[in-house]
Image (cartoon, rainbow, N blue to C red):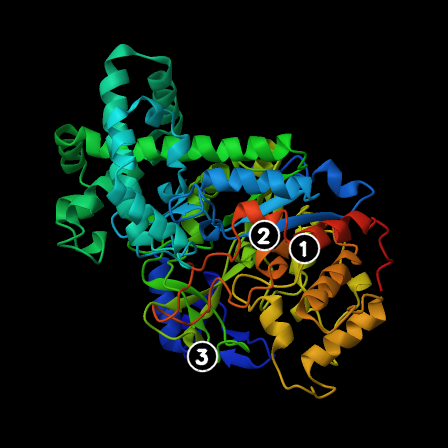
Amino acid sequence: MTASLRERAAQRGISEGYHDVAGNWHTVGAETLEQLLAALGPDLDPETDPAPALGPCFLPPALSEDRKLWALSVQLYGLRSARNWGIGDFGDLAQLAELAAEAGAAALQINPLHALYASRPGHCSPYSPSSRLWLNPLYIDILAVPDLATSETAVRFIEQDSFRRRLAALRASPRVDYAAVAALKLPLLRLLFGEFVDRHAGQCSERYAAFEAFRAAAGRSLLDFALFEALDRRLVERHPQGWATWPAPWRDREPEACRDFLKRHPREVLFPMYLQWLARNQLEDAQRRARAAGMPIGLIADLAVGVDPAGADAWRDRELLAMDAEIGAPPDAFAAEGQAWSLPPWRPQVMQTRAFRPWRELLDANMAAVGGLRIDHIIGCERQFWVPRGSSGREGAYVAYPRDALLTVLAECSRRHAAVVVGEDLGTVPDGFSERLAGSGILSTRVVRFERYPSGLFRRPSTYPELACACAGTHDLPPLAAWLEAGPAEPDPGDERALLQAALVDAGTEPRSEGVEDRIAAVHEFLARSPCGLVLVQLEDILAEREPANRPGTGPEQPNWQRKYQLELAELAECPAWGRTADLFRRAGRERPSTE
């Protein structure tokens, strides 16, 4: 490797090597450096750095009150109810928020609600969205759409026996059938949209004026997304791989071709806007109901680390995205060859030359209707692991990002929206990064399974930091029931479950019995003994479920992002573990142990 190549890479923020999770050093090869330099694109002169923030991120006053705050974590699509259409929806979300508030929860954290593909509903990973700026319309609660009440045609359609049978089958299924849900919901929403436009557009009604105001406020971003959705719907059968294979005028977003399409198919572009209007209104209503029920925070949304390269955001702004690279992770205990997630990273120099407007726009879009935001892989504010597209994760390298500017904009948006920020700072974390998060008022993430001393013993809860969100697991880990039941009948003293048992005894939260429900409760009480400002409890753990939302590294052979919860919403309040969890946190005080 020549000194010139190393110098060019270093000047652009590309690391010469990296340590994996075990501390082993990997030197980045010359080919990788060349590929990543090409993916970065030309260097650019920044406009200006963002003005200094007035302070750190917003922190709810409740975090300093004399009580233990806890939040319920849920995969929205997996909620069951007697009224949804085979997938959890915004109506379910509002109902669950009220139930959780009654149980004493301060917040309800949800999976990413980002827009996927209306034309390809089988692409269902919320962490590989088409757009992070807009919402998934499959979460719309059709029964709560005002236009349904005035549509005799839609009501007759819903009341047909054939429709009722399809609906019953979707509700009874243990998994979400996204294609079948879309086939049921989208045609009816299209019918309601057509009647809405016919009834209101020429009359300048109050309802249509509200829709027009939403469109005007959303501006070009909504128009671009809606245009992509309309084009994708027309072209998906001939071009299933996405916009990169579309005819050149549309692929390259030629202004004349886009204007012509808008002129010839205005309603096809207007329909996705109508769906976003409905979705945003229902999400805002769920947040209002959560706060009205007594939650000091309400909903905590989840911001995915990137977007699918075939989606709307990539089509809209190819300059911002390094399409020849993928965001990933270096080798670790879960992936010996590292990971590459297909998601193209943002080019840091493009963000800088635009005065960080794309970052601000993204944060504003995701904070606008909620009380908090979890940022997946927040380490990306300092560095991201880039992998040349098509290579293994082992062939990647870290690329530096303008951390101070990104955190400044994050604090500005957090304070403007009064939204608490939780950073997912797991994995190979730069030295001092979690402390820098704390300095910016961002809650770090502490997962009990990863909180170990060098000897392998579990850390005492008193060693956890105050400005943190403590939890038992994540969507990529087996739920507590599966983890606690695994292993031999008589575990070795060095087995992690035996070590956990010792930690529970040491903390005074020893399980009352060997039953898995008691052991899960003991882990939650262990976390409640920490000084962390917020404790996150997964609904999967309350219900002692065994399957995770996602099994990393697997494909269609696994029902990732499709599993439903065992109980319906109406049954939760009567579930003994639900009441036990509520009682546990009611008893937990805010006496924070001194840091060890």
Q: Provide the residue designation for mark 3.
A: 337
Label 1 sits on a secondary structure element that is: helix
Q: Provide the residue designation for mark 1.
A: 576
Q: Provide the residue designation for mark 2.
A: 73
Whether residue 355 is visible, yes or no, is no
582 vs 547, left or right, is: right
Q: Nearer the viewer, mark 1 or mark 2?
A: 1
Q: Earlier in the sequence, mark 2 or mark 3?
A: 2
**Foreground pick, 247 / 461:** 461
Q: Earlier in the sequence, mark 1 or mark 2?
A: 2
Residue 50 horizontal/vertical position (percent): 54, 39
What residue sits 63% from the left and 47% below the top?
Answer: 573
Residue 179 horizontal/vertical position (percent): 29, 53
**Foreground pick, 228 / 321:** 228
Distance CA(mark 3)–CA(mark 1)? 43 Å
Q: Kindly check if marks 3 and 1 are in contact, taking CB atoms under 8 A apart as contact.
A: no
Disc tally is 3
Q: Nearer the viewer, mark 3 or mark 1?
A: 1
